[in-house]
Image: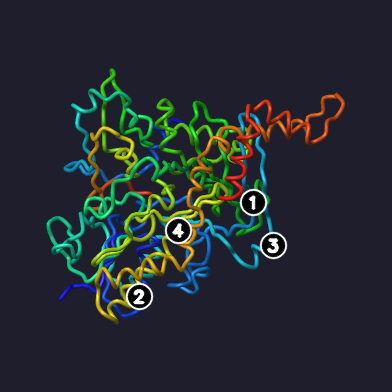
Amino acid sequence: MSEFDAIVVGGGPAGTSAAMRLAANKLNVLLVEKADPPGSKNVSGGVLWGNSLSGVMPDWEKTAPLERYVKSKGIGFLTKDSSIDINFRSTKFNETKTGYTVLRTKLDQFLNKKAKDAGVTVVTGVTVDRLAFEGKKVVGVEQDGDIITSDAVILAEGANPRVAIDSGIRPPLKDEDVAIGVKEVIKLPEKTINDRFNLREKEGFAGEYVLGFLDGGVEAGGFLYTNKDSISLGVVISMKHLRENNKTYSYDIVEQFKNHPSIAPLLEDGKVDEYSARMVQEGGLASIPKLYGNGYMIAGDAAGFSFSNGLILQGMNYAIASGIAAADTVVEAKAGSGISEQSLSRYEEKLMNSFVLRDMHTFKGIGDITWGSLIHQKMPGVLEKVMLGLFMEDGEPKKHVNQIVKEALKSSGLKSSKLLLEGYRMYKRM
Amino acid sequence: MKIEDRLSLLNYKIDKSYAHITVKPDICETCPDHFCTFACPAKCYTLIDAKLNFKYEDCVECGTCVVACAHGSVSWTNSKGAHGVKYKYG
């Protein structure tokens, strides 16, 4: 007889959602989180997209500590001197909120408290070393030589999945699996943020940028999200390209983004109040490990669930949805034939029937595009030349748009055959 | 803003009795790239007189270094007993 029906490792969105769902089904659940207070080691960009949290907390939009809802979504291409931006704003986002900016230390503390209120035994400040096995069956977790037993373990340990790796249930991470995320939180008065981003109270901006001005082939994306009275800004750097470059420091790239002539005025007089970093799961389908086995499942970032197509970057909604699916799998297995590899295989089926794994399959190979030289090295420069051709008045006779575009492509050295092929791939995969 | 100034904004509960990351100096000595010094966002890895110097105290526990080191020098474990970095925003 196990001490718990289920143990959840990790008190982030995946783990707390799983724990709440299990407790709602009257199971005896232990949630183990290494940080104390919970959330104090967790970092997100972060926008919480979608409505997955309603699966465990129907009133989350009213009760959770949310900063602002996304009213305005930006996409930008930055060159050394210019920025080419699309800014989509819609009153449709007032009616149906699609995303909220959050600060994870606050959000995760709230989620852990909700889990506790729901009857979960929440233990913080305790680090799980590895899974405990009996033969090939996972029978609990091991911590400092102690074994705590459970019928099932849900591993929701985040982007740096040491327990899974050290337990031999997933391979170590490789360059293709992750990017380096570096972030700063910059304090600014609420009114200043509203004025600079053309926002009213509670309205927020979420922008993603291609940083086409970085030297030496370094490829990175930038993000800038507005909180109530701060800005979350950061970069997501390709591990592979940083390694090939091997002369640029990861911590300098975020400064280059902040100092860009289009970004710096937005941050003026702001005070950097926190610096943070995490790995970002960028490998897509190819990086996803075996998701379940006899007695365990892997959820959230630890399973490589995140989504990026260059226009948007999501993780927390995948974490929550996978945590809930893992919990439901335990509930069903216990009510049926019991916990086994066979009964837990339902977890993968559930994910295949939800956006979590379906998106991974639909966007298989997207990384070749989002981390390709077309988007990072060529496109920003071409767009800049086109815009300058259109808007820089030099007193010369005007040219047709097609002439301007042709010249911009020519000067970028992009062969039209390559552009056609790459453009086609982008069009198909994005 | 210098990285040292940014790191100084962070709160840590430093574990004096346990280094959650260790490196193998003999491997680092012959390392041809020292990519860790570029990859680590917390500047825990630096070259002093061409020799690798590592300190775990500033670590933000992202795990980047163990992926970055292609030579098997870095051993990474989770911090214990709520030690290590403590973010206020995250």
Q: Which of the labelled discs sits on residue A316, or is there none?
A: 4
Instruction: Tell me which numbered mark, 3 or 1, is placed earlier along the sequence.
Output: 3
Q: Which residue was labeled with disc 3?
A: A91
Q: Callout 2 environment at 10 Å: few (<14), some (14 to 19), or many (20+)?
A: some
Q: Callout 1 environment at 10 Å: few (<14), some (14 to 19), or many (20+)?
A: some
- x, y (%) of residue A199? 66, 54
Q: Which residue was labeled with disc 1?
A: A194
Q: Residue at x 45, y 54 (%)?
A: A306
* Mark closer to the observer (3, 2): 3
Whether A317 is drawn above or below A430: the answer is below
Kind of residue at badge 3: Thr
- x, y (%) of residue A211? 56, 36
From the viewer's perspective, is A69 left or right of A20?
right
Q: Which quadrant of the figure has residue A238?
A: top left
* Mark closer to the observer (2, 4): 4
Instruction: Tell me which numbered mark, 3 or 2, is placed earlier along the sequence.
Output: 3
Instruction: Tell me which numbered mark, 2 or 4, is placed earlier along the sequence.
Output: 2
